[in-house]
Amino acid sequence: MPAETSGLSRRRLLLGGAAAGAGAAITLGAERTGLLPGSMAAASVDTAGVNGARIVPFHGAHQAGVTSTPGAHATYLAFDLLPATDRERLRAWLRLLTDDAARITQGRGALADLEPELAVRPAGLTATFGVGREAVVRAGADAPAWLGPLPAFPEIDALEDRWSHGDLMVLLHGDDPTSISHLARMILRDSRSFATLRWRQTGFRRAYGSDASGTTMRNLFGQVDGSRNPRPGDDAFAAAVWAGDEAPAWLRGGTSLVLRRIAMDLEGWDEVGREGREAAVGRRLADGAPLTGGSERDEVDLDATGPNGFTVINPAAHAARAHVADPAQGIVRIGYSYDDPVEAGAVDGEGRPAVSNTGLLFGSWQRDVDAQYVPMQERLAQADLLNTWTTPIGSGVWAIPPGCEEGGFVGETLFT
Ligand code: HEM
């Protein structure tokens, strides 16, 4: 166990000695000035509510939650269809949910909304709908071969049903948890006679305004996570994400979502020194730059060797194992952290009462799950240094239909 991160030395650092005194002075100084390391100036406050009023258009060729910058908060809902929800009822349900989403994301109350005031601050709210195989079958459409549970990855998986699958998935993301909550409630209310809620998962990134916009998120291991993601509008994004002629006609202009709930063992991670943490991914913690040099958005150089003749990046490092040379064969990740209450009786890796229940809601968009996601996940399951501290506990795959125009509804192409 590296001395600088052991529980004992942390306590020493905090409770005794000259080092603790110096640390306390630095912290106090930072509080006084409002400045923290890395910040440029004291934070200002957005008193005008400009971000609250921000609207991401709902209608368009693609669903807006795929193409817009992920908001600070996310709620995922997954439903199981009731037996009586046949083709016609499914169509009616999708039309109803689209109407709720089209109104509330634009800052207007839903039909028969008793709290329309909750809708007036969408703060970039988007709603993205995805269908599972059963929904496609009930609609009478052809399902792509990849639509269904991922193959098992016995080396790593500890999947629980309560976080997995679902016939319909809704992802709500935006910067205001109140507007997300309101849209979620309208969707739940309007779903009662069509489906039952299977699970609900929530996640977060830094609050709006904490970082300059466009800053890559940090996950709860403290890593800069998402650096190599293509951005909406890039050719690489389009090549990786949008389903084309190879997909059933109803899915063209849509994509797929894989969602993995991945538990992160923060207590185990506590035992790892900074060097080991950086080696596990192949990137620096401070700024996300590759260990082979350059800056955050640069690729890691997997062939560069050090003075000892070994590659600088461990071939089992996460970024090495996940890397694909051709962006069209890659995926676009959308991650949200979760930090939930510890469940009764939970223990950590040492058998002590657990103090955290944390992880990543790992989402990824790709045209074709079998061609893009599965080979990558197979490589990571076989060898990835990060596997020591991560465990997938939930999993689901949905087809994400294209967007719709005003008057239409998401999923309408399933019925034509
Ligand atoms: C809790 C689990 C995970 C954590 C903490 C994690 C963290 C990271 C970090 C810190 C990076 C480097 C920065 C970046 O390029 O974003 C990265 C890269 C990447 N990760 Fe993950 N990741 C996790 C799970 C996954 C999974 C399940 C997949 C896909 C099956 C995946 C695919 C990728 C890809 C494709 C890259 C970019 C590789 C490159 O080309 O450099 N990650 N991840």
Image: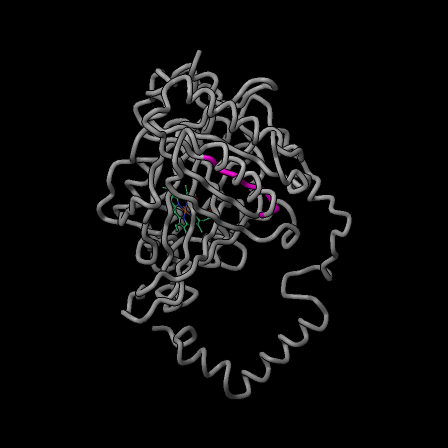
Give how far across and how far down residue 165 sits, in percent: 34, 37
Q: Nearer the viewer, residue 303 or 33?
A: 33
Q: Is residue 6 depicted above or below 359 in this figure?
A: below
Q: In which quarter of the image is the N terminus?
A: bottom left
Q: Nearer the viewer, residue 390 or 293?
A: 390
Overall secondary structure of the magenta section:
strand
Lateral position of residue 360 relative to residue 60, left or right: left
Give how far across and how far down residue 90 sits, in percent: 42, 22
The magenta stretch spans residue 172: yes
Q: Which residue lies furthest to the bottom in this view?
A: 17
Q: Is residue 177 depicted above or below 357 in this figure?
A: above
Looking at the rendering, which quadrant does residue 151 occupy?
Answer: top left
Give how far across and how far down residue 46 sits, in percent: 74, 51
The magenta stretch spans residue 45: no
Give how far across and how far down residue 243 sits, in percent: 44, 22
Residue at point 34% right, 58% down?
389
- Looking at the rendering, the stretch of residues picked out in magenta corresponds to 170-177
Q: Residue furthest left?
A: 154
